[in-house]
Image: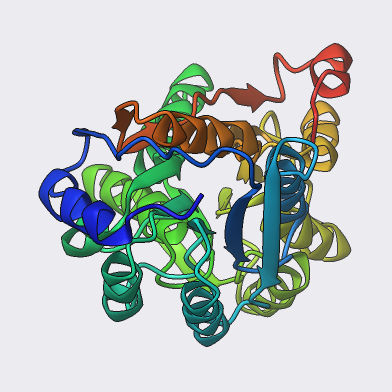
Amino acid sequence: MKKGKLAIAVCLAVLLSGCGREVQLPVDPAKDKPIVVGFSQVGAESEWRVANTESVKAALSEENGYDLIFEDARQEQENQIRAIRTFIQQDVDYIVFSPKVTTGWKTVLQEAREAGIPVIMIDRDIEEQDRGLVTAFVGSDFRNEGEKAVRWLESLLEMQGRESDPVRIVHIQGTMGSAAQIGRTAALEQAVQQHANWEMAAQECGDFTRAKAYEVMTAILKQTKDIDVVYCENDGEALGAIDAMEEAGLKCSAADGVIVISFDATKLALQYCLEGKIGLDVECNPLQGPYIDEIIRQLERGEPIEQVKYIEETQFDCFTITREMIDSRNY
């Protein structure tokens, strides 16, 4: 599918200036060759990320008419930028990437636009002023995820008659500067400002990994064990924080211990939720491959697309989760 790429660049420049607008590319007359897609994944730091990668690979498979070129950036933005430039040199039909952080993408995305290659961004977002360089975004509303968690915590404390009691919160943040970290952090920080009795006892980066979260939580516990809530920005961090707390003799329980809040809703974390160790797990859906496939199919047919596609997501808490819910999950 080698389009008239100058025409695509002109279309993108005109049509991709704002979120939510429909965009349309010319119909490609050549349909006898596989669609070549370059995919730069940020890494494999968690079960969620592995599931995300496998979903994309399954959707953009050879059987489905694709030639997928996959590059693992190993948590380095420089590797992603290098991969995207390589994809441009290879004259791929589409570029798919999940940005490690929100900043630093303008130059390479401008290069992709000048080459006439549509770029589909997944999972994480970039700075608002650069979004016009991206054809489409598929992923989560991270600020909304954080607000769901905060509302649940407010309701739980009210139900327990603790809405006026001091609430000491440990916040384990994800990779600093990533869209997930920015959105989930903003929701919690705003809630702390709005509740005079809520206190941020500690705020450290767990880099979205179990090992790092265990390390920082262990260090925090050497300073204080007076903790009511641990707000972790993904499941790996929650598991690591729980490991550290249990070693220190703390009970993780929304009913009568430290309330643990997490994001992603992977099967292992939901098992912890079923056992009562994680109070709330807000879903972040990694199964984004079919959405990418559909966007590419629409562009191939010359049909309009939505520039921003937020995936529907739910949440699970320790009071209502069941074994059947966990067993029905695909990741």
Q: 231 above or below 243?
A: above
Badge count: 0
Residue 208: % across, % down: 63, 64
Residue 273 visible in rendering: yes
Q: 260 above or below 241?
A: above
Is residue 209 shown left or right of residue 148?
Answer: right
Name which residue lies at 54% across and 64% down. Answer: 174
Is residue 277 shown left or right of residue 96?
Answer: right
Name which residue lies at 30% across and 40% down. Answer: 25
Residue 261 visible in rendering: no
Q: Which of the pair 271/124 is nearer the observer? A: 124
Name which residue lies at 60% across and 55% down. Answer: 36
Quadrant for the C terminus, please: top right
Q: In which quadrant of the rendered view does residue 31 lie?
A: top right
Q: Which of the pair 267/1 is nearer the observer? A: 1
Q: In which quadrant of the rendered view does residue 194 lie?
A: top left
Q: Which of the pair 301/97 is nearer the observer? A: 301
Residue 168: % across, % down: 48, 54
